Amino acid sequence: MDFSLTREQEMLKKLAAEFAEKELEPAAAEMDREHKFNEENFAKMAKLGFTGLGIPREYGGSGGGATEKVIVVSEFAKKCLTSAATLSIHSITPGVILKHGTEEQKKKYLPMLTEGGHLAAFALTEPGAGSDAAGVKTTAVYDAETDEFVINGTKCFITGGARASVLIIFAQTKPELGVKGLSAIIVEKGTPGFTSGKIEEKMGLAGSETAELVFEDCRVPAANLVGKEGQGFKIAMEALDGARVGVGASAVGLAEGAIDLSVKYMHERVQFGKPIAALQGLQWYLAEMGTRTETARWMVYYAAYLQDSQKPFTKEAAMCKLAGSETARFVSNLAMQIHGGYGYMKDYPLERIYRDAKITEIYEGTSEVHKVVISRAMLGK
Ligand code: COS
């Protein structure tokens, strides 16, 4: 058992930390205030190869795997959860194309989504299909005359959906088969019949635009099918396993960022004639924050290790997401207590961190969904 990072991983961590400090942190408050995606920083992520992580170099990627993504996403989240989530969610789609796509799809889309700097989106959720992901109602009817799918339906809460150049959407190609009739299909931005609707106003994660997507007789070539017809649900669930490790990593990063701020503040802030670091009550808060964060971190690394080793990791992905997100909320809450009134003010980053933390317990599967996944695995169901 070796808990250390390789030399390359250490270098990547340093690069990600420097980038987060120089580029992401200064932009975080404005993104939050303006509720606007930061195109410039996404382009810089692509230039530095962060968007290519997990994709082989022959397709424009930077190599590496789940562990490298975890390292980078955590470093980003220390300074800006929105940026970490943007990278993590973007990477789902190229990951699916790499695993299930045809050679033509890989050659066409992967270089765009890695070194090309184009944003990707993953569109599963619908108004009636949230936790019950199998409840997708969007249809994709095959038209043999034109060899196309005709897509109709509405997706909601899609991260980057209105901006993405390439989306993987999940639709019923054989509704009579229920969950076994779902298929994964690539849709490109600008395809007639595909429009984006409302951009949601959110409590946190404001710089990641969450969109409604509308498909009205939207025709895409049958060659855009990813994997086999009817494999969509499994493809989505597998992709979400990886995405959940990403959420765990971002939650741990956010918690680390909140701890860093708390330690600094405890040394600086003087009350009762001494720095508040001397107060045992706050020392105990800090100890609990550190212990929970460290626990979640190793759960995240373990899930990423299993994923990189091609071993089953569904349960561990759900566990690290559950533990990580609960840690993020717990730690950001105590960090707020430590900062007192200053923590609550918009001039300081903590109130954004506190608001951002909450989403980690909701997106890519709620905590309750993860408890279902974990207990089913434990019970052998
Ligand atoms: N990997 C591969 N296949 C999986 C899988 C996984 N992680 N999880 C389930 N499957 C397969 C099952 O093996 C089953 O296939 P078979 O019928 O061939 O055995 C099929 O998918 C249906 O699985 P299951 O019966 O478990 O589906 P449920 O409808 O009970 O759904 C939950 C299970 C609730 C776990 C799922 O709907 C879920 O994850 N919901 C949350 C969705 C989510 O995270 N949304 C966030 C936004 S998406 S960006």
Image (cartoon, rainbow, N blue to C red):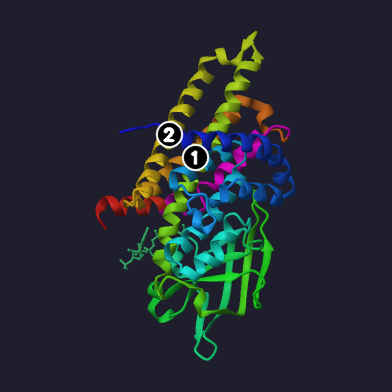
Residue 90 is labelled as none
Which label sits in the foreground, 2 or 1? 2
Q: CA distance from mark 2 to mark 1?
A: 10 Å
145 relative to 262, above or below: below
Q: Quadrant of residue 234?
A: bottom left
Element type where label 2 sits in the image: loop
Q: Amino acid at mark 2?
A: Leu
Quadrant assignment for the N terminus: top left
Residue 5 is labelled as 2
What residue is at 59 percent from the left and 50 percent from the top? Answer: 86
Q: Residue furthest top?
A: 273
Disc 1 CB within 8 Å of nearest ligand 1 atom: no
Q: Position of residue 103 (x, y in %)?
A: 46, 68
Q: Is residue 39 left or right of residue 360?
A: right
* Magenta stretch, residue numbers: 347-369
Q: Position of residue 326 (x, y in %)?
A: 47, 40
Q: Residues within 10 Å of mark 1 (few under 14, many from 20)?
A: many
Q: Residue furthest bottom?
A: 145
What residue is at 52 percent from the left and 34 percent from the top? Answer: 11
Q: Is residue 12 left or right of residue 315?
A: right
Q: Which residue is mark 1?
A: 71
Do tag 2 and tag 1 residues touch (Cβ < 8 Å)? yes
Q: Position of residue 30 (x, y in %)?
A: 74, 43
